[in-house]
Amino acid sequence: MPGPKPRPIPSHGELEAVYPRLTLEEAAEHFGVGQTLFFKWLKARGIPRTRTHRKPRSDEHKKHLSEAHLARTREKKEPNRTCPTCRKPFYLRPSSLLDVNYCSRACKALAQKNSLTMKNCEYCGREFQRRKIETSQNFARRRFCSKKCQTTSAPPPTYFGKDNPKWKGDDARRRNRLGPSRKWREQVLARDHATCQRCGTTDVTLVVHHILPFETYPEKRWDVDNGLTLCQPCHFKEHGWELSEKGVREFTDERGVLLRRWIGPCLNCGKFLVKRASDLRRTDGSTRDYAFCSNKCSLELAWKLRNGKSPRSSYSDLFETYAKSQKMKRKSQSGRAP
């Protein structure tokens, strides 16, 4: 069922004939509508509303306005608090009462600025002072005198091994200088008084050797009883590396660490190479006396041997031939030198 039809808005002349001659309330009664609808009519026809009150206000109306605008709602009660800064008594409603109350924000800021200057550490009990650039709120939140006391009192959780999100496997253990490898090495060196347990040397670079292999016995990796302090030559002998291998030389780097390196040419292209001595060891325990600069050179020379492109039948024969040619070349160059 359709609702009542909306009442048409009177014309501009009809509204001006009534308003503002009559008040808003009297004009609305004249048209038989409410004051809200009559105000919308004025707004729709563009007639401004006058703000002058032509109807006199009653005494009761004036009393209500006085109480609302002049904030004369109730009489002030007796003071129930004393400001600790200025010692001025003031009243505070019961719902806002705290342990310490101030009469104004200025008194509160002054108290916080001057009162908190010294505190005691909750861990060591030492008294510490507020810093010059530190705010009063930050100093009030501080509980410890230093970062060390804070960490010792509530240490953060630490994760080792596979529980650590940065775990990279056992292959990366030597690069983790802050992990168990460093701690285990220091404990073994302290037990052996930083002395080689084979020759008794103390004034050289020392290494810590695993008695039981690192890869074979994972449960004994960080056992102090499984460690042994050795110097570099004794460590080489412990692993069965002979010191007189062909092409292997010993030298000391700028840090004073004894190194064993194989120095020689690539067997295929003759490029000068420097490799670790352990890289030349075979799985059966023997040591190669030749090396390649890349896998490409190794495959290329193997193809030559397989197809008869090389006069020799093995890598060793090729290395001897190359070494003799290089030796003759050096002698010829030295003979031509003035």
Image (cartoon, rainbow, N blue to C red):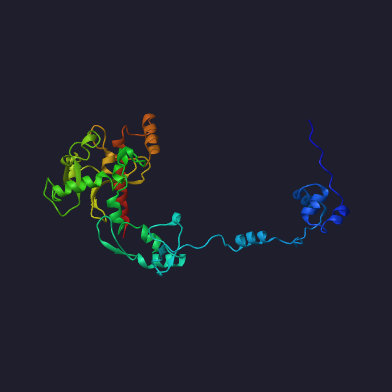
Q: Quadrant of residue 161?
A: top left
Measuring from the top left, give residue 190's x and y in whole percent: 16, 49
Q: Is residue 232 above or below residue 115?
A: above
Measuring from the top left, give residue 216's x and y in whole percent: 23, 33
Q: Nearer the viewer, residue 253 or 126?
A: 126
The answer to whether residue 32 is left or right of residue 105 is right
Measuring from the top left, give residue 276's x and y in whole percent: 28, 44
- Please tell me which residue is depicted at 82% across the width and 38% down the height of the picture: 5
Give the farthest residue toward the right: 13
Q: Quadrant of the C terminus?
A: bottom left
Measuring from the top left, give residue 308's x and y in whole percent: 37, 30
- Please tell me which residue is depicted at 38% across the width and 40% down the height of the picture: 294
Residue 131 in view, yes or no? no
Q: Is residue 316 above or below residue 203?
A: above
Residue 235 in view, yes or no? yes
Q: Is residue 22 above or below residue 4?
A: below
The answer to whether residue 158 is left or right of residue 56 is left
Q: Nearer the viewer, residue 64 or 243?
A: 64
Tally the marks: 0
Q: Quadrant of the N terminus?
A: top right
Q: Nearer the viewer, residue 163 or 190?
A: 163
- Please tell me which residue is depicted at 84% across the width and 47% down the height of the picture: 9
The answer to whether residue 306 is left or right of residue 19 is left
